[in-house]
Image: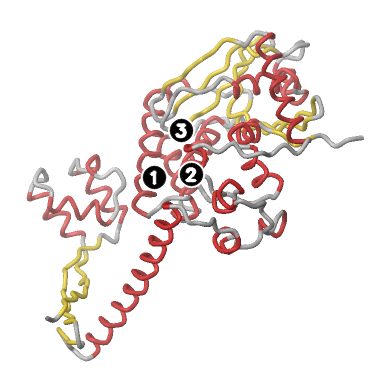
């Protein structure tokens, strides 16, 4: 008996975007680079699951939800999340907190326990092993359910294909039917009544009525066509400016290299650094402008890293010999001392900011945001003095280099 093809909405979406990209990801099993928007979305989905978990009889408070979010967020570094810098990650964290706070302000009074949250469904149907993760299913009574899918991206508008897929899954899933029957034993048939996208950044919900059977049938024929093409090994690339610009596989794609990829695949690809294969073995000839720019960025970054390390070593030597300035053959080095204030007791600082009614000015109380209040013209001088009393003075030594003519 032929094995069912492992399939999902996201796999179908990638194949439609570019069959060659699908081949790299799911046939060769080459991992993609981390994407910050995936990490951001995952963190907020975790919070929604935490809030609505049917196993918890009491809903968490806002403070508990924010603490849960922070704990989840801090499990990985900014680069593991896919952010370009710690500052950008901090901005993402602040946006996540804002979303949770506004969500509570709008919905905390009417929290209820749904039928399920983040339910992973595996449905064997028409030669497919269809995997879906359903963000939330609400039971409306009389065998009717509502499917809700959280969105965290910039855009609100969505294609209906994802909801069509969920409707097909829910109405054919024995596991979901069993969940409904536990609440309502007399139910013989499950029916999707509503399908919704909930855009968390704007708290805007788009709700659709159940899709007609004719639309679901036509959609499903398209799904089966994609599955047939995958089984037949049809992976011709479909290049385009948008899909190629941000693709992780462009440096090994035959569109740019002129040859098929022959690097590590499967287990080896998932457990080895693919950088040499992506940049050396299959680098496009000639190089594109984007490739040349990327190389210069990497080279500049490496030189800056080396320069920062040299500066640390120079500062240590100058301080050890009590030198304020020193000369090389071409450059003069001089130490610049900058007084810094460090706020070590975060809990007390937050309490003080709340008392001074300054907490709203620093959404995330970090060393830099709290110190910034001391130069904020709108903050009263008395409040600044109280903040300074919480700070520990330290000295930051920087190196100024000047070319000697």
Asked whether 336 or 247 is in front, the reply is: 247
Asked whether 10 or 320 is in front, the reply is: 10
Give the residue drawn at x 60%, y 62%. 281
Q: Earlier in the sequence, mark 3 or mark 1?
A: 1
Kindly identify which residue carries mark 2: 246
Classify residue 335 as left or right of residue 46: left
Q: Nearer the viewer, mark 1 or mark 2?
A: 2
Give the residue drawn at x 44%, y 54%. 78
Vertical comparison of 27 with 137: above or below = below
Mark-to-mark CA distance, 1 and 2: 24 Å
Q: Residues within 10 Å of mark 2 (few under 14, many from 20)?
A: few
Looking at the rendered image, the quarter that the C terminus falls into is bottom left
Circle 2 sits in a helix, a strand or a loop, which is it? Answer: loop
| Coordinates of residue 308 in the picture (x, y in percent) | 32, 72
Q: Residues within 10 Å of mark 3 (few under 14, many from 20)?
A: many
Circle 3 sits in a helix, a strand or a loop, which is it? Answer: loop
Mark on residue 236? none
| Coordinates of residue 367 in the picture (x, y in percent) | 27, 57
Give the residue drawn at x 69%, y 22%. 222
| Coordinates of residue 194 in the picture (x, y in percent) | 58, 13
Give the residue drawn at x 51%, y 38%. 243
Mark-to-mark CA distance, 2 and 3: 19 Å
Q: Residues within 10 Å of mark 1 (few under 14, many from 20)?
A: many
Mark-to-mark CA distance, 3 and 1: 13 Å
Mark on residue 93? 1
Q: Earlier in the sequence, mark 1 or mark 2?
A: 1
Q: Nearer the viewer, mark 2 or mark 3?
A: 2
Vertical comparison of 179 with 45: above or below = above
| Coordinates of residue 56 in the picture (x, y in percent) | 58, 33
Kindly identify which residue carries mark 3: 152
Q: Earlier in the sequence, mark 2 or mark 3?
A: 3
Looking at the rendered image, the quarter that the N terminus falls into is top right
């Amino acid at each position: 008996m032929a094995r069912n093809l492992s399939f999902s909405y996201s796999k179908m979406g990638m194949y439609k975007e570019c069959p060659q990209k699908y081949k790299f990801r799911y046939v060769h099993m080459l991992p993609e680079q981390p994407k910050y928007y995936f990490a951001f979305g995952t963190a907020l989905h975790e919070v929604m699951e935490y809030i609505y978990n049917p196993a918890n009889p009491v809903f968490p408070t806002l403070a508990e939800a924010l603490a849960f979010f922070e704990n989840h967020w801090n499990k990985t570094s900014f680069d593991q999340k896919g952010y370009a810098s710690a500052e950008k990650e901090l901005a993402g964290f602040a946006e996540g907190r804002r979303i949770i706070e506004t969500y509570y302000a709008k919905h905390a009074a009417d929290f209820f326990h749904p039928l399920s949250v983040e339910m992973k469904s595996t449905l064997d149907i028409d030669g497919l092993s269809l995997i879906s993760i359903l963000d939330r299913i609400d039971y409306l009574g009389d065998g009717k359910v509502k499917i809700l899918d959280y969105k965290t991206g910039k855009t609100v508008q969505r294609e209906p294909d994802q909801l069509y897929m969920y409707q097909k899954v829910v109405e054919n899933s024995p596991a979901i039917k069993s969940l409904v029957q536990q609440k309502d034993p007399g139910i013989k048939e499950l029916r999707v009544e509503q399908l919704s996208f909930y855009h968390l950044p704007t708290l805007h919900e788009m709700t659709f009525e159940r899709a007609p059977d004719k639309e679901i049938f036509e959609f499903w024929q398209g799904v089966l066509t994609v599955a047939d093409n995958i089984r037949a090994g049809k992976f011709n690339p479909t290049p385009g400016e948008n899909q190629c610009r941000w693709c992780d596989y462009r440096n090994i794609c035959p569109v740019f290299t002129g040859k098929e990829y022959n690097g590590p695949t499967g287990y080896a690809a998932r457990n080895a650094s693919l950088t040499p294969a992506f940049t050396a073995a299959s680098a496009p000839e000639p190089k594109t402008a984007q490739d040349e720019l990327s190389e210069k960025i990497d080279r500049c970054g490496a030189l800056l890293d080396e320069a920062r390390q040299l500066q640390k070593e120079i500062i240590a030597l100058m301080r050890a010999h009590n030198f304020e300035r020193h000369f090389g053959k071409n450059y003069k080095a001089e130490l610049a001392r900058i007084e810094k204030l460090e706020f070590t007791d975060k809990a007390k600082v937050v309490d003080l900011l709340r008392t001074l009614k300054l907490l709203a000015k620093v959404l995330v109380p970090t060393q830099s945001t709290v110190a910034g209040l001391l130069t904020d013209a709108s903050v009263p001088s008395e409040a600044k003095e109280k903040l300074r009393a919480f700070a520990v003075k330290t000295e930051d030594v920087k190196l100024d280099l000047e070319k000697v003519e």
